[in-house]
Amino acid sequence: MANTILIGAQWGDEGKGKIIDVLTADADIVVRSQGGNNAGHTVFHRGKKYVLHLIPSGILRRRKVCVIGNGVVVDPVALVDEIEDLRASGVTIDCNLLISDAAHLVLPYHAALDEQRELRKGRARIGTTKRGIGPAYGDKAARTGLRVSDLMQPALFSKKLAAKMRENNAILRALGAKPNDFAEVNERYLRAGKVLAPFVANTVVYLHRQMQRGRDILFEGAQGTFLDIDHGTYPYVTSSNTTAGGACTGTGVPPHRMDRVVGVMKAYTTRVGEGPLPSEDERVAGMLHEMGREFGATTGRARRCGWFDAVATHYATMINGIDELAITNLDGLDSVHPISVCVAYRLNGQRLEVPPCDSAQWENCEPIYEEFRGWNEPTGRARKFSDLPKNARVYLETIAEMTGAKLTMVSVGPTRAETIVL
């Protein structure tokens, strides 16, 4: 397997948690490199559903080491809660988890600021999870953030926290919001720090030593390509690099040590929150929601849904250097006929083969569709590509060719067994 980066090739929620779980069988180490507990990776393991937010999905498998890299922003209290919930479910967490000492912290004032900023944007809101991820990354960029290494030094942490809370409480008061109580926050986070202390390490050194020993590493991306701070539908994006390059900067593993990039994409298109989605279709959304599908793992919000957008996924292949494709949720289209695929955009009378940079222009793009025949039969029992209906095989091969990468995996259901490996 060597070193593999797995990323979302759309707007997040592509089913990365399940594909990571499948690939973890051949990995020794699973690493998160960006994002925070705004992510929600759903994994079905031994008949039980798990939703993981900060801890890599490999934690559910024995003899796998999970690493939270320096590029992740960590809410210590939320992480402790996640650890305790997993342990209560019988999951072992001890020397199989490492947390980077250089990862930045998400604190209560970040979440409060996140909420206030969203409230004041009105219709121009971004649609964040209000978990404080953006403000935490903002402090990181402004070089004023607190890190895990600070939390491991209680006196230093308390001093830095007091200064930051004075500053941010003044902002919250000015916005008409309730300020945070220093004593309560300080005590709660120091208590979480004691729980997390055994897991804290220089994860850059750890990963390099493991590579020298020939260990196979899987880099688990969160969110999706078009939520990337640089390459996404800005400003309707997250605050980190969700593309393949983020796996390098967020872990300290150099680009030339990466062996392959696997892109995960649904057989249709979804996104949560505001921003462009050219192939959005209310009929598709209604059908999927009636099936009980497409509700956010973190927020529970109904996802916006539409037809497969080959313009976006082809661009995602360019940005990420995607070698292989895992297509998920094929079974969501089992009763759909005909099926549309967006093959180009039309903007101001011109045909576009790649997305525009400006989100307002992207919002105004009209999808140009090609139609495909549906298969009108269940695919959930297929375990080989040849088991799929002919029209389903044609559809998969065509959208993979449009995307520009090799199809290597198809998911026809939520469990590990409901996976076709080509």
Image (cartoon, rainbow, N blue to C red):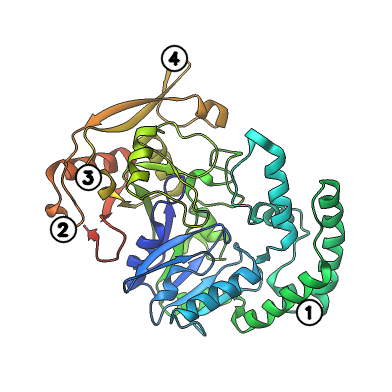
Q: Which quadrant of the view contains residue 306?
A: top left
What percent of the width, then of the height, locates residue 106?
68, 63
State the residue position of label 1: 154
State the residue position of label 4: 349
Q: CA distance from mark 3 to mark 1?
A: 56 Å
**Residue 384 disc label:** 2
Q: CA distance from mark 4 to mark 2?
A: 43 Å
Most foreground residue, 108 or 358: 108
**Residue drawn at x 22%, y 43% as measured from the top left:** 397
- Asked which secondary structure carries label 1, the reply is helix
Q: Nearer the viewer, mark 3 or mark 4?
A: 3
Look at label 1 and name its amino acid. Pro
State the residue position of label 3: 334
Q: Counting residues from the N terminus, which is met first, the one under dot 3 or under dot 4?
A: 3
**Residue drawn at x 31%, y 60% as measured from the top left:** 414
Q: Which quadrant of the view contains residue 157?
A: bottom right
Q: Counting residues from the N terminus, which is met first, the one under dot 2 or under dot 3?
A: 3
**Residue drawn at x 59%, y 71% as measured from the top left:** 79
Quadrant position of the C terminus in the picture:
bottom left
What percent of the width, then of the height, locates residue 236?
58, 40
Left or right of 148 in this view: 422: left
Quadrant position of the N terminus in the picture:
bottom left
